[in-house]
Image: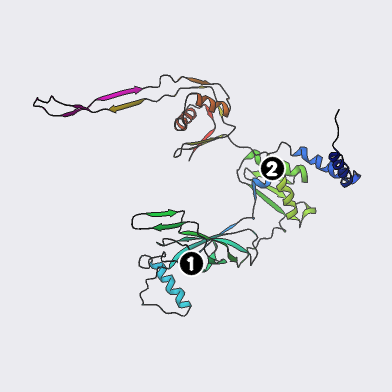
Amino acid sequence: MTRTHPLATAIRTLLRTLVPVSAAGMVAFGVMTALVPATAGASSRIKDIVDVEGVRENMLIGYGLVVGLNGTGDSLGNSPFTEQSLIGMLERMGVNTRGQSMKTKNVAAVMVTGTLPAFAAQGSRIDAAVSALGDAKSLLGGTLLVTPMLGADGEVYSVAQGPLAVSGFSASGQGASVTRGVPTSGRISAGAIVEREIEFSLAELPVLRLSLRNPDFTTAQRVAQAINSVFGANTARPTDPSSVVVTVPQMRRGDIVGLMTEIEQLRVTPDQAARVVIDEKSGVIVMGENVRISTVAIAQGNLTIRITETPQVSQPNPLADGQTVVTPQTDIQVDEQSNNRLAIMSNGVSLQELVESLNALGVGPRDMISILQSIKAAGALQAEIEVM
């Protein structure tokens, strides 16, 4: 006989009190239930596979000086640009040093880079990355002076300044040195202030263009179908493998943000071409799930010759008028790996079957690269090979 615990009974009573069954509740749950089956078999959000044309970041770059280094800055004799920048900066401050010999090593010339996000407002802050330009040993403890950061059009979009956060360090003595990380680069978190905004009116666009990060005809068609199933036919149409044009419905004009929010949450299953990516430097092989092999026979074997030298000492008798000599003794072994067998792969084998068959032959990554290229040359690999 099963008995119900008093605590369980109390919890059920509390839930009935907090969540009453009503008509409004049934409608809400009905909408949620209707949306779930449409996305049950999907794998990716549209947000994760496309970019919106016009909504993009912009790269910024600047040249500046880092001061306050503990003797680890640029050598002014070897870095004339650092000396010229230091003289120019001091002149702007009212200090004339022209014709003087400066030997300070507490200053370093640096390049400052950053990324201006889309729709960044004036006065907002962004991160700045600082990298040494001369022969400075370390930027640890340095402070970046006011540095304008320019865009590709030559206009100033932000100004950076502040103390650097350097994760690496370097220490040395007369007999040894230790270096951890990269001490000649650092970062200033929220160290650049946006001074100029990039004008772009998203709310007034009558048409949105979605750009696929991995261009594909099938994926573009699936994205358009997912959008049309929610917002009506002819709302979206693919124009090429990398672009889907979305016509903003008349009732959603002025609500582009809300429209894009709904579109980004739709789910589709991206398609991909059969491709084998090979990195010969590291021996890495990556194969997509659509890779197929036609009927082919594969045999793999390497000829290994091992030569072992074992010197032997020839010692004469004590009373003999001879000399001690070393005589070489060579042992040569030849391994043709005759135990390896011929493997036959039937038509249309999957990626898992291909890997299992190659592993059964005792094939390593390096040999597998040659085998895959040979299969492709024979016309039996139904995939594209990309060598990095």
Q: Position of residue 341 (x, y in %)?
A: 46, 19
Q: Under tag 2, what secondary structure?
A: helix
Q: Position of residue 385 (x, y in %)?
A: 51, 35
In contact (CB < 8 Å): disc 2 and disc 1? no
For this rendering, which residue is in front, 326 or 340? Answer: 326
| Figure quadrant of residue 105 | bottom left
201 versus 336 height, above or below: below
User: Dot 1: few (<14), some (14–19), or many (≥20) neighbours within 10 Å?
Assistant: many
Left or right of 71? Residue 207 is: right
Left or right of 265? Residue 165 is: left
Q: Amino acid at mark 1?
A: Gly
Q: Position of residue 251 (x, y in %)?
A: 80, 53
- The magenta region covers 311-339
Position of the N terminus by quadrant = top right
Q: Nearer the viewer, mark 2 or mark 1?
A: 1
Disc count in the image? 2
Q: Under tag 1, what secondary structure?
A: strand
| Image point (38%, 66%), residue name | 75
User: Dot 2: few (<14), some (14–19), or many (≥20) neighbours within 10 Å?
Assistant: many
Q: Residue furthest right?
A: 23
Q: Amino acid at mark 2?
A: Val
| Image point (42%, 79%), residue name | 96
Check if residue 256 falls in the magenta segment.
no
| Image point (87%, 47%), residue name | 18
Left or right of 368? Residue 273 is: right
Q: Earlier in the sequence, mark 2 or mark 1?
A: 1
Q: Which residue is mark 2?
A: 223
262 versus 165 height, above or below: above
For this rendering, which residue is in front, 252 or 318? Answer: 318
- Mark 2–mark 1 distance (CA, rounded to whole Å): 46 Å
Give me the disc on residue 64. 1
